[in-house]
Image (cartoon, rainbow, N blue to C red):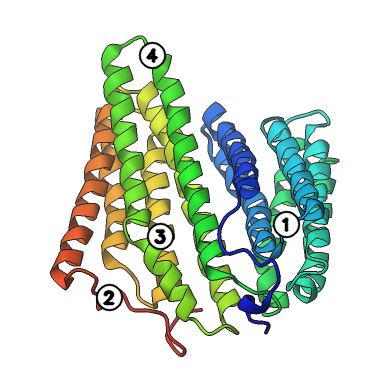
Amino acid sequence: MTDETALPGAAESVRPLELFFDLVFVFTITQVASILTAAPTPLSLARVAVLLVIIWWMYSGYAWLTNALDLDRTGPRLLLLTGTAGFFLMSMTVPKATGKGPWALIFGASYLLVVAVHMLGFIGTSGHRGIMRIGPLNLASALVVLAAGAVSPHARLWLWALAAALEGVTPLITGVGEFTVGVGHFVERHGLAVIIVLGESITEVGAVTSRENSVTTSIVGALLALVISAEMWWLYFGREERESEARLERVPAERRPRVAVYSFGYAYYVIILGIAVAAVGMEKAIDEFHHPSHHLSALLLPLGISLYLFGLACFHRTLAGTWPAARLTAALAAAALVTPAAVRTSGAAALATAALVLLALNAWESRQVRGAGAGSTSTHQVCEPGSPSP
């Protein structure tokens, strides 16, 4: 496998055009989450989970692509802007794609454009051989998404699920050894996606609280939501991101793409899904700030936080080779404590309980770090050849 240091034009850090692309991608995530906001039902949750697989798969694919692209040249810039346009069209049609009309078909056509641009972009890069293996399956899944637009809304979810399943198994079928991972750019790019998704989620929550007439709901609700988002940020960026770069760098080059797929692909999907669901859960908790929640609305906040913590645990496991017991315990605690607070007390109690669970986890991890000594990595094993990572 080619070493990334020998690649002309290989990215060393995130470029401004990639940030522009990421902002459009995050708008797409927000639009997907709006399906659950509008109708907090199990069917809507299933649609969000499946659509997010489809969308995250290609976002991650573009992160691999820009890892190899020289964006100082006009051609690659125009190519990435074309992919950005495809994502923007997807974002505009997603909320209507679950119903009647041509919107699902337009969504599928936009997705097909995104996939085609992704394949074309790899020509002449270090990943050209790899895309010849993965690209046909990507096109097949995109055609399934396109076909979903031609069936009834009741059958559409099944075709979307088929496309998502195909994408999920693609790396297992084709392998990813023909791709090169530039570690610094790769870690930074995915970290920025988390920051922007968290930021957009709190923006959406702020928009909800600004419409409230109650001063208590607007101020206290907004601050509690901000605290929860900040605590979620801290859990990843306090230490995990920095150490993940060192761990991925230590993985042998021939194994690095596979480890990257498991950590920044599969595990990261759970992280992003958790943020999106938690954001909707915070909105619903603010709507029910002074009284108990009911049905799925009461479960969204604890579910989102539990998914986020479980995703972080899986991410840590793939890179460090060990399960972080505290995060798994906190995921269970969020489900066990926040749910009854929402169902029996109020949205305010649910938000406060969620904030306390995350605060306790952050405090525990900070204490463990101090106990291990500044700069020590003894409690955070670096992934080595032969360690129990994927």
3 or 2: mark nearer the eye: 2
Q: Hey, what amino acid is under mark 3?
A: Leu
Comparing labels 4 and 2, the label whose residue is closer to the camera: 2
198 vs 5, left or right, is left
Q: Percent from the top left, x then y, of residue 309?
A: 37, 55
Element at badge 4? loop
Query: Between disc 2 and disc 1, whose residue precedes?
Result: 1
Asked whether residue 346 is in view, the answer is no
At label 4, which amino acid type do we have?
A: Glu
Q: Is residue 348 left or right of residue 385?
A: left
Rounded to the nearest whole Å, what is the CA distance between mark 4 and mark 3?
A: 33 Å
Q: Secondary structure at mark 1?
A: helix
Q: Residue under circle 1?
A: 162
User: Residue 120 — which label?
Assistant: none
Please tell me how many numbered marks the rendered image carries: 4
Who comes first in sequence, dot 3 or dot 1?
1
Please tell me in which quadrant of the rendered image residue 367 appears.
bottom left
Q: Are marks 2 and 1 in contact (CB under 8 Å)?
A: no
Report which residue position mark 4 lands on. 212
Which amino acid lies under the numbered mark 2 shown in the image of this protein? Thr
- Mark 3 crowdedness (10 Å alpha carbons): few <14, some 14-19, many ≥20: many
Q: Residue at x 46, y 30 (%)?
A: 203
- Distance of label 2 from label 1 (alpha carbons): 42 Å
First in sequence, mark 4 or 2: give its number. 4
Task: Check residue 377 in the rendering and tell me which mark sits there, or answer none.
Answer: 2
Residue 212, position as x, y percentages in the image: 38, 14
